[in-house]
Amino acid sequence: MNDLYDVINRRRDTRSEFTGQPVDQDALERVLAAAHCAPSVGMSQPWDFVLVRSPQTLAAFRAHVAREREVFAGSLEGERAETFARIKVEGIVESGLGVVVGYDPSRGGSHVLGRHAIADAGLYSVVCAIQNLWLAATAEGLGVGWVSFYREEFLRELVGFPARVRPVAWLCVGAVGHLPEVPDLERFGWRHRSPLAEVLHEERYQPRV
Amino acid sequence: MNDLYDVINRRRDTRSEFTGQPVDQDALERVLAAAHCAPSVGMSQPWDFVLVRSPQTLAAFRAHVAREREVFAGSLEGERAETFARIKVEGIVESGLGVVVGYDPSRGGSHVLGRHAIADAGLYSVVCAIQNLWLAATAEGLGVGWVSFYREEFLRELVGFPARVRPVAWLCVGAVGHLPEVPDLERFGWRHRSPLAEVLHEERYQPRV
């Protein structure tokens, strides 16, 4: 029994906590089933999940991410550069499992109900699946780290997505010793969480002063 | 106590089940706090939530959605047109509350950690917040209906988002008598859910035959 609010509060983006222990197969199936149970525009279920465990593929992706980390680091100066240098951005090899999530806009027939006015609605469905996956993994005691230091074209080729399938995420999924109480970016002084009141508006958007 | 998996399975896109009873304020605050607790790229928390209850605004949005429904209906023929005619696509007025969700890419400072290579990573964060909101509302016994029959420019002007803020969703949130066990689109014969195995791949993407 895992209380929803408790899971939502415990969920963390995991980088350093992976133990390398294999993920229990039944737990992984429950996590993937939770993702597949997400809402989708016109019930198109436009996601794909590629489970990557090959050490060669994990290492190739990690090398690519390391290069992209350098690209971002090169854009920073002073305190930002120093703070970023302390932050780990991925646990690709340590987690032992990458779940690559793709968006296939051809799923759901030629007329997807609810997508004619908003082309990105299909993409939104895929992210709903990712969030379900993340929460279910948290409930199972697994860590998830969403890596976004990569170029989509590199990842598409790495896992063999056809041209129409857009890579949306690389998720490191694995056993963890614990989940940090404070998010890494806060702990290392990159950013702090804001109060809810700052993003709430009544009836109409009110610019903040 | 709401078990995560139970909530994930009970969650439905709600159209016809709203009772019009007012939403409990404490429950709404828990639901919005759950949304605000979502992961976000570089901890940018790039979402805004506008709570719309004004009958005039609800009616104006419903009229716009009705026109967009006709646009989509006009693209259909034969069985698809007949099936779609039976499907309700929104509960904007009946729910009594619209939560308009926006994406503000200016949030999070000039260098958002994790967004340099994937511009849409901020948009993904907003959708994670929506899915948290949806699950929390389900746990609170509330219905949520994600309406996507609208033009973004219309909604931006309706709630006064500045040009940089992108409307991502109109969510009808309200008290419901019950949540349907079978999704509407399945019940009315629009689409059926697929088995998980169809979207799972090992190591590399495998085209389905």
Image: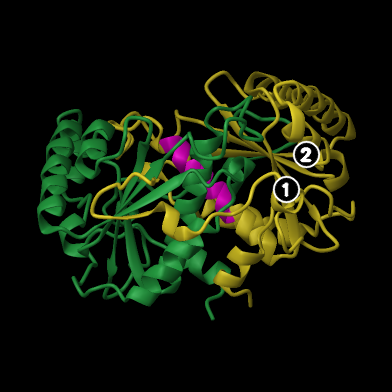
Chain colours: A yellow, B green
Majority secondary structure in the magenta region? helix
Quadrant (top left/top right/bottom left/bottom right) for the C terminus of chain A: top left
x, y percentage for residue A75?
70, 22
Q: Nearer the viewer, residue A202 or B37?
A: A202
Quadrant (top left/top right/bottom left/bottom right) for the N terminus of chain A: bottom right
x, y percentage for residue B143?
33, 65
**Residue A158 makes an appearance in the image:** yes
At label 1, the amino acid type is Gly
Residue at left offset 44%, top offset 52%: B130
Residue at left offset 81%, top offset 63%: A178
Which chain letter goes with mark 2?
A: A
Is B88 within the magenta?
no
x, y percentage for residue A109?
37, 32
Ranked by sequence position, the earlier of labels 1 and 2 is: 2
Judge whether B125 appears above or below A149 on screen.
Answer: below
**Residue A26 makes an appearance in the image:** no
Magenta span: A122-132
| Position of residue B146 in the picture relative to residue B52 (left or right) | right
